[in-house]
Image: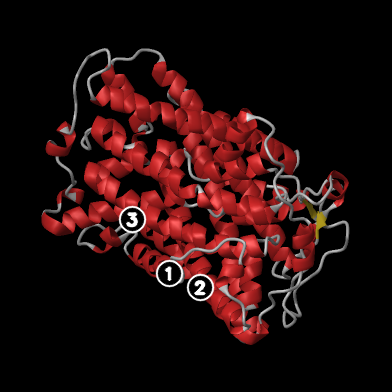
Amino acid sequence: MRNSLSSPDKEKAFEVDIGSGEHASSNDSYSPPPDFKLHRQLKNRHVAMISIGGVIGTGLFLGTGSALMNGGPLGLLLGYIFIGSISYCVMITIGEMISYLPVAGGHIKLAERFVDPAFSFALGWNLWYNWTVTLPAELSAAATIINFWHPGVNNAVWITMCLVVAVGINMSGVGVYGETEFMFASIKVVLIVGLLILGIVLDLGGGPNHDRIGFRYWKDPGPFVQFYGISGTTGRFLGWSRVVTQAAFAYVGLEVVAMAAAEAKNPRRNLPKAIRRVYIRLLLFYIGGVFVIGLLVPSNNPLLNVNSDNASASPFVIAINQAGIKGLPSVINAALLTSAWSAASSDLYIASRGLYGLAASGNAPKVFLRTSRSGLPYVAVATCASFSILAYMAVNTSSGMVFTWFSSMCATAGLTTWFGIGVIYLRFRKGFLAQGHKMTELPYFSRLQPFAAWWVIGASLVTLLFSAWEVFLRDNWSIATFLTNYLPMMLFPVLYAIAKIWKRVPLIKPNEMDFHSGIAEIEAMTHADVPPRNIVEAFWMKLM
């Protein structure tokens, strides 16, 4: 995402000062010297595709298998609708703030302006932990997918191969990242649209076996799964709660638009456009995708168990194999592999920019502010990439099992981030109104506020509390399940308490919140879109 200035020369010359826009009371925040700056190199098409890429990933293509197995087709659909409602509210919530203040560090920096430095500290390290752990999750998913072709090869080979791709993309600069993400996201869009169409055709009996499925699997084995054989409402609720946790992993990442805001051209025009269109992607890709999956594959199919280390755990691949279509499963898995590459690259991008934002706020060593001449925060990228060695746990353990562990950790950390975004917005809104402004003055605003923010806070908390409720049932205790689901949730208040004691800074009062620092630079780079010259350009601008 790039912010264009009023002329191409200014556009190339502009650099982001991450230290600008600090609240006056944040004495311990750090303003980097001129050499330590990010550059705005992401174009409108990059912004649009990154917002799509944050929606489509291995959580949808691979993780939905275990979700269907745990919740059944209706439980799967309801779980994704529930989390989809939260994620949409997250997008419009963060959209109002970040389109007005597209600062480096995204919501981490906004927390420092509108809540307090301690909240920024806790939220920043939670975000860094989230995306640093998500990277090995995606690498494990990639190993699971490649096992489809070469099940006898050591997983370390595939993890190393995918890691080299992700690190190479990020070390090449944000411009290369934007182009590769544009390419990968385009493949994912074509893939999911094609799978949706193919799924409907197969369901209606258009496959080689001419088996008209309809809603057969909603009747037998049924719309819900009795989790662990527990009868009644309790069993169905537990199954649905496992779906919700997996769905959270699939949806988490929409907020990547906020982290990329500091490297986006013309953010006050490009960011709102990406946010306004996200609901279409949510409905089409996620809700539509899981609905089709629930039609095509029965919830009791043993291949859905991702922990079996069987690459056919992708429900789309299972459905295609059942229909008797030869060769296509390998094509689908090849496309899924690019999805894992894309997700791993994005994870490393977000983690490194989060670490950069922490350093800019004085919450991490200043060495992470060091950038190359092209604006690449190479120290932050290299540090975050080093944690990817956790993916090698899949060498001695099922790659599917490792994927499950890490995806649970990412989901709970991501829900904690969503909770924090809701809190920041309520503080932002209170201060904005207290200082005599109207919400309609924002480049982007939603009539659903502040109810959307409250929904984000409440629904995220409830989801966190029930993310691994089954471990508290008799004879069902699992240390791995408990830690991977509840550790991030426990970590956040501990970090906040430590930072509160350390920094000793009170909550920022609404009438003292800083809504003006850095605004002049942002407004200077805002310009109207160049009108299309023909029908093709008009269609492209509408699409992007």
Q: Nearer the viewer, residue 220 or 47?
A: 47
Is any atom of residue 402 visible in this view? no
Q: Quadrant of residue 497?
A: bottom right
Judged left or right of residue 168, residue 141 is left
Disc 2 + disc 1, Cβ < 8 Å: yes
Label located before the other in sequence (2 or 1) = 2
Q: Residue at x 16, y 49 (%)?
A: 226
Image location of residue 233, percent across then percent down:
14, 58
Q: Is residue 396 above or below residue 330?
A: below
Image location of residue 310, percent across then percent down:
37, 29
Circle 3 residue: 82
The residue type indicated by label 2 comes to Val
Q: Which numbered dot is residue 127?
A: none
Is any atom of residue 63 visible in this view? yes
Alpha-carbon neighbours of circle 3 within 10 Å: few (<14), some, or many (≥20)? some
Which quadrant of the figure contains the C terminus? top right
Image location of residue 483, percent across then percent down:
41, 60
Judged left or right of residue 119, residue 376 is right
Q: Quadrant of residue 59?
A: top left
Judged left or right of residue 218, residue 108 is right
Query: CA–CA distance between discs 3 and 1?
Result: 14 Å
Q: Residue at x 26, y 30 (%)?
A: 296
Disc 3 + disc 1, Cβ < 8 Å: no
The residue type indicated by label 3 comes to Phe
Q: Which numbered dot is residue 457?
A: 1
